[in-house]
């Protein structure tokens, strides 16, 4: 990569890295997996930087790469296997705000991956419906319906306090 293009890439990534890591973490709920997703996304971005830097909306372009890397990780067979017979307990801090955040992240994990991606991009990533549709490569109507369904499910899970008990949840088996 030429020096000028490389400098542009480094400048862009330096500014956007915290946002990209946050996006990946909200999608997968695992800091280490989020690091892997961001690293893979930034590698892809580096390889195609000349083309990517000419995009109309570079942030949407990069967000789309992150979401696609997340979805690729979810499709891999090893990502569905739990290496123990029980889910490890989460540490609680008792400080204000952490419990609510943990509950929200746990409730987000209950959603199907499409609804989760829409809610994370729209409400936690503060993206418009149109930008979310562009990132996910779907229609605006699909974003709206996924948003509506996802919010309804999220509300019911949070109100009922039944995080971890959504019917049909097969996250912890190797059959999903």
Image (cartoon, rainbow, N blue to C red):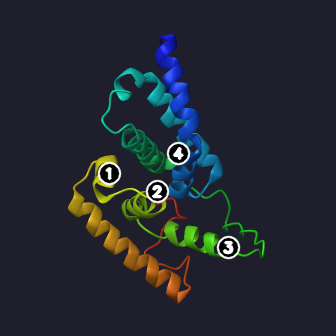
Q: Quadrant for the C terminus, please.
A: bottom left
Q: Is residue 143 left or right of residue 105?
A: left
Q: Tell me where residue 148 appears, x and y as whole percent.
A: 32, 73
The secondary structure type at the circle numbered 2 is loop
Q: Which residue is mark 3?
A: 97
Among numbered discs 4 and 3, the one appearing first in the sequence = 4
CA gap, disc 1 and disc 2: 11 Å
Mark 1 in CB contact with mark 3 (< 8 angstroms):
no
Q: Residue at x 53, y 58 (%)?
A: 26
Q: Secondary structure at mark 4?
A: helix
Q: Position of residue 107 (x, y in %)?
A: 53, 73
Front-most of residues 39 and 4: 4
- Residues under numbered marks 4 and 1 in contact, where contact means CB atoms less than 8 Å apart: no
Query: Residue, x 64% and y 51% (percent of image)?
Result: 31
CA gap, disc 4 and disc 3:
22 Å
Q: Circle 4 is placed at which residue position? A: 20
Whole-Å distance between the Cαs marked 1 and 3? 29 Å
Sort mark 1 into few (<14), some (14-19) or many (20+) by Cα contacts within 10 Å: many
Which residue is pictured at 56% across the width and 76% down the height?
164
Quadrant for residue 168, please give it: bottom left
Near-viewer residue (25 or 60): 60
**Which badge, 4 or 1, comes first in the chain's sequence?**
4
Measured along the vertical axis of the image, is residue 162 above or below residue 170?
A: below
For mark 1, give the secondary structure: helix
Q: Which residue is mark 2?
A: 125
Contact check, label 3 and label 2, Cβ < 8 Å: no
Residue 139 location (% of width, % of height) = 22, 55
Label 3's element?
A: loop
State the separation of the CA atoms marked 4 and 2: 10 Å
Q: Which mark is residue 131?
A: 1
């Amino acid at each position: 990569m030429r020096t000028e293009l490389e400098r542009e890439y480094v400048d862009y990534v330096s500014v956007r890295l915290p946002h990209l890591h946050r996006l990946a973490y909200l999608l997968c709920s695992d800091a280490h997996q989020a690091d892997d997703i961001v690293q893979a996304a930034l590698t892809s971005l580096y390889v195609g930087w000349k083309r990517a830097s000419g995009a109309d909306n570079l942030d949407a372009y990069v967000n789309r790469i992150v979401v696609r890397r997340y979805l690729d990780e979810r499709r891999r067979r090893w990502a569905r296997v739990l290496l123990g017979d029980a889910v490890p307990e989460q540490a609680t801090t008792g400080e204000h705000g952490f419990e609510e955040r943990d509950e929200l992240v746990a409730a987000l994990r209950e959603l199907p991956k499409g609804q989760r991606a829409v809610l994370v991009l729209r409400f936690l990533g503060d993206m418009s419906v149109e930008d979310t549709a562009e990132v996910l490569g779907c229609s605006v109507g699909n974003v709206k319906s996924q948003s509506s369904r996802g919010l309804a499910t999220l509300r019911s899970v949070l109100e009922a306090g039944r995080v971890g008990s959504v019917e049909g949840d097969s996250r912890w088996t190797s059959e999903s």
